[in-house]
Image: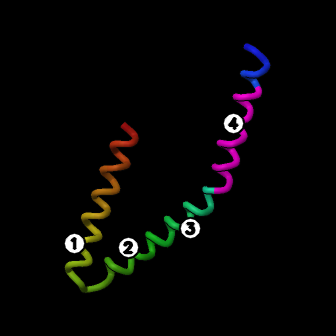
Amino acid sequence: MMPDDFYIALRHFIIKLGSLLLLTPLFGYLLMDAIDSIERAWKSNNKKRKWLVSCTLFFLLAIIAGWLR
């Protein structure tokens, strides 16, 4: 392994770690906001909103299942 390869791998690792540390709180906040929005829509008596929430959750679960496959 050449020294240049090591520095390239180290730089790649630092960029990945930095982006993970910066983006994790943002994604967490957006996820919590989405959960609050879904919960408010589900507790409402509007049947169209409940249908939309059900479809959205099914779509998200299908995306996650396809991504983990």
Give the residues drawn in magenta, as a range. Answer: 7-22
Please tell me the numbered disc located at residue 29: 3
Structural distance between the alpha carbons of marks 3 and 1: 25 Å
Residue at 56%, 67% (x, y): give it.
29
Is the residue under label 2 in contact with that under label 4 (CB below 8 Å)? no
Looking at numbered disc 1 in the image, what kind of residue is underneath it?
Trp
Please tell me the numbered disc located at residue 22: none
Residue at 25%, 86% (x, y): give it.
45
Give the mark toward the camera: 4 or 3. 4
55 horizontally vs 33: left or right: left
| Mark 2 vs 1, N-terminal side | 2
Residue at 37%, 73% (x, y): give it.
38
Give above or below for 54 relative to 5.
below
- Secondary structure state at the residue bearing disc 3: helix
Please tell me the numbered disc located at residue 51: 1
Residue 35: x percent and y percent? 44, 70
Structural distance between the alpha carbons of marks 1 and 4: 43 Å
**Screen quadrant of the C terminus:** top left
**Residue that label 2 marks:** 38
Residue 52 included in the magenta stretch of the image: no
| Mark 3 vs 1, N-terminal side | 3
38 horizontally vs 31: left or right: left
Residue 36: x percent and y percent? 45, 75
Looking at numbered disc 2 in the image, what kind of residue is underneath it?
Ile
Structural distance between the alpha carbons of marks 4 and 3: 25 Å
Give above or below for 46 relative to 62.
below
- Secondary structure state at the residue bearing disc 4: helix
**Residue that label 4 marks:** 13
| Mark 1 vs 4, N-terminal side | 4
